[in-house]
Every structure is written in structure tokens, then in C-alpha cells.
Amino acid sequence: MLKAQATLECPPTRESLQDTIQELVTRLDNGKSAAFARRIGVSKGTVHHWLKDGGTPTLPALLQIAGHAGLSLAKVLTGDLTNWSPPADTCKQVTMLFHRSTQRAPRRTLDWDDIRSQLVAMQGDLVPVSVAEAARRLNVDVRQIYQNANKEARVLAERWRQHMRRRGEQSVERARDAIDAACQDILSEGKAINLREIRKRVPQEVLGSVKGVITLLQEVRGRLEAN
């Protein structure tokens, strides 16, 4: 738009733009502003604002007007309608101006025999992987894996559940040991065992890795008090 403005013989004015829009409404849609508004994709009130209230169209609206009229943006801005007549097929021109590709990319063909083989290979990984991670590696939707390789997916899912259960148990044991050591330290200082004192001594990553920290604390405190 700035490039076009630099080549204009005279700068555009609001009045000339208003006159141009009025002329286009008259010649494209027989003076019916509602029809013109539908043509360029704005409300009737917007066109009324341009024509009666001195409003100025936005750049997208100006491009729509230019496309439907078969005019350059510069001519719309300056009101240069010399030798202009309404185009026979404005829809085609606007389609070309605002072309958007609606074609979808070709659908990917999946080799499920190969995918199943890769899923079986993942079952032997030292560190188990979830079905979601397997899907990410293979660039396949999780639902497609369950639909087309259900047996292999269920094996991966079971290994992952067992892996996560073991991790949870290990986290609980690590947290219990840390809380136990912290409680003994608290007692040695002659202080009362409470969660605030525990948080001072046990890293947050340890406490945050388990659920039921209060239950663990009560368990450890009860055992220490019993001894």
C-alpha cells in the first residue's frame, strides 16, 4: 500500500474515497448499500459509516472493494474511474485475489506390518515406553495404533503401567527414608516433628514425587515414638 501511495499523482483524500465508494455502490449494485456490503463481506452499517459518517475502510476492506470492482488499489484510493466499467465476473477476480489453497495434503499411507514390527521391538527397550510415546516416535495417532495394532499396544501399555508402579514405589521408599532421617534430626535438636520442619530438611523434589506426605510423616513419627 505504501509502495502504491508513493506513485500516486495526488494523495488520496477521505472525500474522494467516499465519492468512489458511492459510485461503486451505484454502478455495481444499483445503489443498494446492503447488496454492496454483502458483496465485499462487511455489514450494511459499515458501508453506511463510510458513506454518511466519514468512516474510512480498513486495508482488507479496500482490497475487497478493489477486487470486486476490478480496479487497482491506487485507483480506488484516488477515485480514478476513468474508462472503468463494472467487470462481468467479479467473483472470479476476487477468488484470484484472495486465493487460499483448500486442497488437503495427500493422506499418508501407513505400513502397519512395519509399524507392528517396530512396536514389538520397543517392547524390548531397557526403559519401557508408553503407547503415547511410541505413537509420537512413529508419527501415528494413538487411536490408530490401538485400532490396527491392538495386541502390540496392550503389551506396551502393560509394561508401562508396571514401570510406573515400580517408580512410584521407589519414590515412596526414597521419601520415607528422607523423612525418617529428618525426623531423627528434628528430635535430636529437641524440636517437635511437624511438616514445616520436614520441609526444611527434605528437598521439595523428594516430597513432591509422592502423594500422601502427611501419611508418611505420621507413619515415621509413630514408629519413632514407639521406639
Image (cartoon, rainbow, N blue to C red):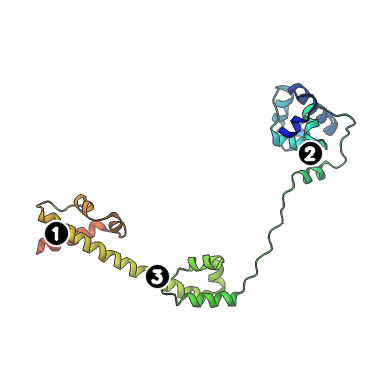
Circle 2 SS class: helix
Name which quarter of the figure residue 64 lies in. top right
Name the spot of residue 11 as percent of width and height, x first: 76, 24
Location of mark 2 (residue): 67
Q: Name the residue under label 1.
A: 184
Residue drawn at (53%, 75%), measured in percent from left and top? 118
Picture layout, residue 186 above or below residue 129: above
Residue 106 x %, y %: 69, 63
Between marks 3 and 2, how big is the CA–CA gap?
A: 60 Å
Callout 3, which amino acid? Arg
* Local crowd size for mark 1, using a 10 Å CA cut-off: few (<14), some (14–19), many (≥20): some
* Upstream in sequence: badge 3 or badge 2: 2
Going 71% across and 33% down the picture, which residue do you hit?
2
According to the picture, the residue beneath numbered tag 3 turns out to be 161
Camera sees residue 31: no
Judge from the rendering whether residue 191 lies leftward or rightward of residue 147; answer left or right. left
- Residue 174 position, x and y percent, is 26, 64
The quarter of the picture where residue 159 lies is: bottom left
Question: Which of 55 and 114 lies nearest the eye of the viewer?
Answer: 114
| Kind of residue at disc 2 | Gly
Camera-side residue: 48 or 165? 165
Instruction: Between label 3 and label 2, give the one nearer the viewer.
Output: 2
SS at circle 1:
helix
Left/right of residue 222 with respect to residue 170 in the rendered view: left
Q: Earlier in the sequence, mark 1 or mark 2?
A: 2
Say which element carries label 3: helix
- Which comes sooner in the sequence, label 1 or label 3? 3
Say if residue 176 shows up in the picture: yes
**From what the image shows, is residue 134 above or below residue 76?**
below
